[in-house]
Image (cartoon, rainbow, N blue to C red):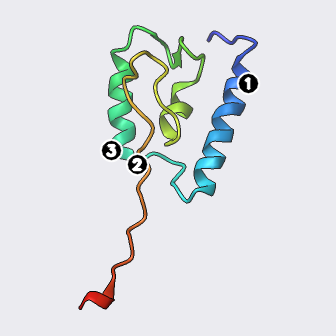
Amino acid sequence: MKLTWQSPFRFAAAMWRALVWACGGRPIITPEKIRLEREGECQVCPHRELDQCMLCSCLLDAKLMLSSEQCPDSPPRWYRLPIKKAAEPQDDSAA
């Protein structure tokens, strides 16, 4: 496993994004189906080494599970979960 001096800072940034994500009412954990799709993309990625992304030094088990994270490749192989807008209230006065 390759850890750099940036690794703890990147992990802290990922945890901060997950906290902000949760405070916005969004799920922290990626649904199983999407996590498996992400994992499939990472399986064939040339930047994967064992269970680590060599672009960001993240452990893939953790990165794939957080819905607030996305692939650091350019362009990303997978994206963070989209933000769902709250349903707009219906106007009953028109009825």
Mark 3 to mark 2 CA distance (whole Å): 6 Å
Residue lying at 39% horizontally and 21% vertically, measured from the top left: 42
Mark 1 to mark 2 CA distance (whole Å): 26 Å
Mark 1 to mark 3 CA distance (whole Å): 29 Å
Where residue 57 sits, quadrant-wise, is top right
Where residue 74 sits, quadrant-wise, is top left
In the rendering, at what x and y percent does residue 19 appear? 66, 48
Q: Quadrant of the C terminus?
A: bottom left
Q: Which residue is mark 3?
A: 33
The answer to whether residue 11 is left or right of residue 21 is right
Q: Secondary structure at mark 1?
A: helix
Q: Which residue is mark 1?
A: 9
> Mark 1, residues whose alpha carbon is within 10 Å: few (<14), some, or many (≥20)?
few
The answer to whether residue 5 is left or right of residue 11 is right
Viewer-nearest of labels 1 and 3?
A: 1
Q: Quadrant of the N terminus?
A: top right
* Type of amino acid under label 1: Phe
